[in-house]
Amino acid sequence: MNAPDELKYSKDHEWVKAEGGVAAVGITDFAQHQLTDVVFVELPEVGASAEAGKPIAAVESVKAVSDVYAPVSGEVIEVNDALRDAPELINTDPYGEGWIFKLKMSDPSAADALMNAEQYKEHAASESH
Amino acid sequence: MPNRTPLYEEHVKLNGTIVDFAGWELPVQYTRLIEEHEATRERAGLFDICHMGEFDVTGNNAFEFLQSALSRDLSPLKPGRCMYSTMLNERGGCVDDLFVYMKEPENFMLVVNAANIKKDFDWLESAAQGRGVSLSDRSADTAKLDLQGPQSAAIMRALCSSELPSRFGFISSDVAGVKTLVSRTGYTGEDGFELYCESGSAVALWRAVIEAGTPLGLLPCGLGARDTLRLEAAYSLYGHELSDDISPVEAGLRFAVSAAKDYTGSGVIKKQLADGAPRQSVAFALVERGVPRDGCEVVSSGSPVGRVTSGTFSPTLKKGIGLALLNSPAASIGGSVSVIIRNRPYAAEIVARPFIAYRGGSK
């Protein structure tokens, strides 16, 4: 399972890259694989406020829609506009060009409470049974 | 405990993602839905459809019975030909949609939806009382495999020495050593075959078709691709476009009802054919990127006019498409409507059906 060590993870299969109080967020390789071909991403509005654990975006495959939850609270300061025309970036590069939005975290240390890569791999393995 | 088809172990071996469908454990996809969809459009796909129901209807009066029970005029049937029809309740609502196969003048096979097997059999038994026909439910010992796509005929020729039937025709033939009913029909909008055999032979037939088809690009396909393929072809799915509360006229299936004979529900149907039905099923495409889903509300000039009955992202057209049941005044081709997806309106246009025209020949 591909889950880079430098990232933090939520139980809802989002990854977080926290730097200088800003959190870049996407969905994990495990999540994109479960969803299969992503054909549409509903991005949040810049300026929207995100509450940890609440849906803030949506990712659609041919078969199903899946909510993307805010892993930490904060304000949306940037969204990945490239996903509007190329939603498949979530499949091809989930931890890079497939990032979804960036949050200015209300609590800059909030990401510390999320899972590390090792813990996330165990969590994902338990869900794939 | 969910039901398993005779091919369950094959799906597991192929790493199929197994889901519950109408009480059956079936693969929704093996590798990627879009890849399986494209294989069927461009080459060939093989589907496990063993869950569907098969009934035998036999007896001197079998034809007269079916002609009085089902909505379509079955008089064009001949031995070796099959027709699509519906069976209706007194309100003109659809009990089920089905295929009627005339094997011999007094021997028919009906193919019905998996979720409706019991309901349909009870309905037919009650309609058949005193009619001198005998009914039997063959669903448990009948397997059904769908081979679909432009390479289907070449694959069948490699497995079967008989001359292949033309569209809506069928033959009984040996296929790779398995006694099979080979029907030139399908649910994808492509040329193809529906293959019926005894459940005990399903694995042998499945493996033989995969072996012959793989060099021609065949992929085993899950229910996910089956749904996107049928939706691009704008074929109705029971429980979505059709239900006990939706008539075939409303669903756009005028070809499947007759105004010239009497059958259960015919009073309502004849009135709808003459005066128009209150609702009409339409095909629509989103004009912006998005994915409409079953149940989404459809709005025209600010007022709700109906709901989406099936929606998806079309792998062929690369846009959101669907079928919706609308109040008839709103249901004109070329009309602009909005589909409400997660509380946001998406602009859509009502278009002619199907999205993808049938691409097989008539032969």
Image (cartoon, helix red, strand yellow):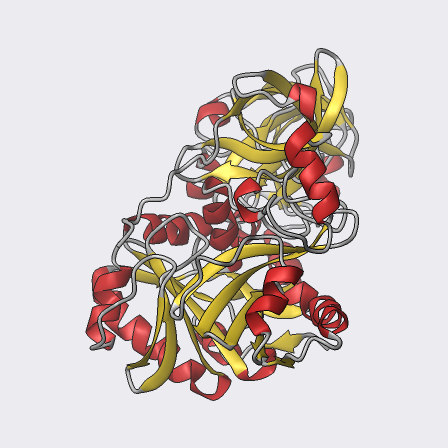
Which residue is at the front of the view, A110 or B331?
B331
Q: Is residue B104 above or below residue A71?
A: below
Judged from this view, the residue extending furthest toward the top is B301
Task: List x then y, in percent, for residue B88.
Answer: 70, 54
Q: Residue at x 70, y 31 (%)?
A: B279
Residue B306: name its quadrant: top right
Q: Is residue B261 above or below residue B284?
A: below
Q: Residue at x 29, y 50 (%)?
A: B362
Task: List x then y, in percent, for residue A41.
Answer: 56, 31
Q: Is residue B192 left or right of residue B262?
A: left
Task: List x then y, in percent, for residue A129.
Answer: 63, 69
Which residue is at the front of the view, A28 or B311?
B311
Task: List x then y, in percent, for residue B227.
Answer: 52, 50
Q: Residue at x 67, y 80 (%)?
A: B132
**Quarter of the picture holding the C terminus of chain B:** bottom left
Q: Is residue B320 left or right of residue B172?
A: right
**Quarter of the picture holding the N terminus of chain B:** bottom right
Q: Is residue B249 above or below residue B10?
A: above
Residue A124: name its quadrant: bottom right
Q: Residue at x 64, y 47 (%)?
A: A13
Whether residue A69 is visible:
no
Q: Is residue A72 above or below residue B208?
A: above
Q: How many marks?
A: 0
Which residue is at the front of the view, A98 or B184?
B184
Whether residue A35 is visible:
yes
